Image (cartoon, grey):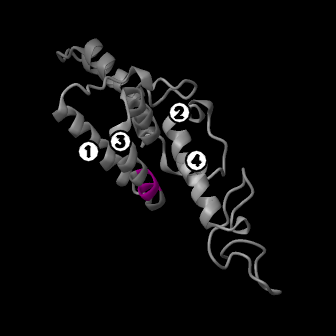
């Protein structure tokens, strides 16, 4: 999804420039700036610039809408494990988050599912922008505590290594594969 957003953000100037050359009346600089500013946080990998989001928590109605939208985004990601983990965490903590906490949550929700899952389960090291995010730190701590409480260490991969999938990954016998569901 972020790749699509980046592609749109980078091709929009080309489309707008070609539209202005064909004498179509479009206010391209204004449209271009406003459109790209909404995607700026998505294609900046070096910095955590979620502080630039405009969030209005003064009105109860806008606050309720924002909370419902963030709750929906956290529960309906299309990746069941993340739906359960993030949905429950957001449900428990959304009312206690201040404006910076909500911006940090939006930044976490903008991360692609496979990357976020690998970072939360310690299969890969996350980038510095995510590592310093307070929401990510809290969710990762919850995941790590749950893994420590409910999963035997033998069932997990070594930190930094991907998990082996399937209950019959290591088959004993002469014709069985060393690892994997082959």
Q: Earlier in the sequence, mark 3 or mark 1?
A: 1
Dot 4: element: helix
Q: CA distance from mark 1 to mark 4?
A: 24 Å
Are there few (<14), some (14-19), or many (20+) residues within 10 Å of tag 4? Answer: some
Q: Count the marks: how many?
A: 4
* Residue 169 shows in the view: yes
The prevailing secondary structure element of the residues shown in magenta is: helix
Residue 141's mark?
4
The quadrant where residue 62 appears: top left
> Which residue does the numbered mark 1 point to in the structure image?
68
The label nearer to you, 3 versus 2, is: 3
The numbered disc on residue 133 is 2
Quarter placement of the N terminus: top left
Q: Earlier in the sequence, mark 3 or mark 2?
A: 3
Q: Looking at the picture, how far across and down is residue 33, in whole percent?
A: 33, 16
**SS class, disc 2:** loop
According to the image, label 3 marks what residue?
A: 94
Lower sequence index among marks 4 and 2: 2
Of the residues under marks 2 and 1, which one precedes in the sequence?
1
> CB atoms at circles 3 and 4 under 8 Å apart?
no
Number of other residues with Cα within 10 Å of mark 3, as a class: few under 14, some 14 to 19, many 20 or more: some
* Element marked by disc 3: helix
Mark 1 and mark 4 lie on one chain; the one further toward the N terminus is: 1
Image quarter of the C terminus: bottom right
* Cα–Cα gap, marks 3 and 2: 15 Å
């Amino acid at each position: 999804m972020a790749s699509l957003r980046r592609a749109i953000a980078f091709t929009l100037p080309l489309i707008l420039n070609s539209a202005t050359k064909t004498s179509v009346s479009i206010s391209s600089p204004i449209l271009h700036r406003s459109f790209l500013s909404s995607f700026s946080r998505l294609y900046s990998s070096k910095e955590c610039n979620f502080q630039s989001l405009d969030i209005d928590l003064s009105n109860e109605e806008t606050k309720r809408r924002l909370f419902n939208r963030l709750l929906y985004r956290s529960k309906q990601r299309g990746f069941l494990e993340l739906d359960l983990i993030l949905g429950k965490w957001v449900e428990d903590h959304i009312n206690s988050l201040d404006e910076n906490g909500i911006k940090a949550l939006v930044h976490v929700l903008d991360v692609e599912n496979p990357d976020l899952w690998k970072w939360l389960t310690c299969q890969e090291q996350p980038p510095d922008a995510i590592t310093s995010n307070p929401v990510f730190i809290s969710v990762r701590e919850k995941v790590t505590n749950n893994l420590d409480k409910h999963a035997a260490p033998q069932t997990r991969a070594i930190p930094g290594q991907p998990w082996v999938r399937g209950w019959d990954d290591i088959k004993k016998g002469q014709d069985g594969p060393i690892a994997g569901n082959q």
